[in-house]
Amino acid sequence: MIHYQYLLFDADNTLFDFDRANRGAFHAVCQAMDISESDEHFALYERCNNALWRAFDRGECTKDFLVIERFRRFLAQLDIERDPERCNAVHLQALSHSSFPLPYAEELCRTLSFTHRLYLVTNAVAAVQRSRLRRSVLAPYFSGAFISEDAGAAKPDVAYFDYVFAHIDGIRRDNCLLIGDSLSSDIQGANNYAIPCCWYNPKGAPRPDRLRIDYEIRDLRQLYNIV
């Protein structure tokens, strides 16, 4: 029995190993910009980057600001002079060539594509994400991809989901399921739009009290018994 005909998958760290791609892109920046690469420096970059993405999810900054500002803050913390715009260009170029599926993602998408309609819902940089999706082994299994820049709004904004629903024939709030790893964009977005959601939580992070989480999985294969 099919419970949810339309599956809305987040991309990064839900189906794609973004951590691996991100570390590779950071390596490319360090190589191109003559920056000493270390675990400490990567952790510093991640703190700058993640803080800005959280601000983006709250609607406090634009994506264009975010992608440059993260490197500006990173370089300021290191007290070195480099061009943050050039750092970002190198980073995005490296990311656009990286689309590593997470364990069981290909098997899951291939199997579900025979019985369900699969869509990607992502806030990532549009040019980068299109390139990554085009190169991905998962691409044949998806009926469409909705990138926030194209929608004119981003998860968790209701306007983003209005855009998604306007472009999928037959979708309703009761026949779709959003699957994602981010509490602030995926799960909050599903809460805002009153659609069912599944939190992909492979590391077993504490479950928050403030959000409705209809399902929680730590292995993608657990979706088979839900959808």
Image: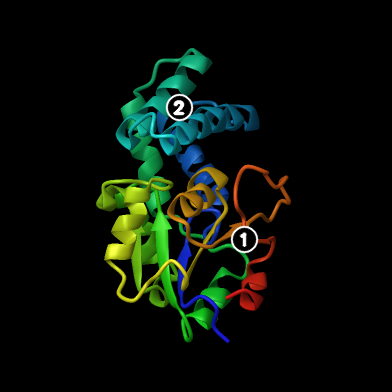
Q: Find residue 89 and report its image quarter.
A: top left
Identify which residue is drawn at 37% across, 72% down: 171
Q: Is residue 23 left or right of residue 131?
A: right
Q: Secondary structure at mark 1?
A: loop
Most foreground residue, 205 or 226: 226
Residue 50 lies, with reference to residue 184, above or below; the image says above
- Mark 1 or mark 2: which is in front? 1
- Number of numbered labels in the structure image: 2
Q: Find residue 198 and report its image quarter.
A: bottom right
Q: Which residue is mark 2?
A: 34
Q: Position of residue 94 (x, y in %)?
A: 41, 47
Q: Which residue is mark 1?
A: 214
Q: Secondary structure at mark 2?
A: loop
Most foreground residue, 2 or 42: 2
Amino acid found under the numbered disc labelled 2: Asp
Identify which residue is drawn at 57% across, 26% down: 44
Amino acid found under the numbered disc labelled 1: Asp
Identify which residue is drawn at 41% across, 63% down: 120
Task: Tell me the quarter of the image containing the N terminus.
Answer: bottom right
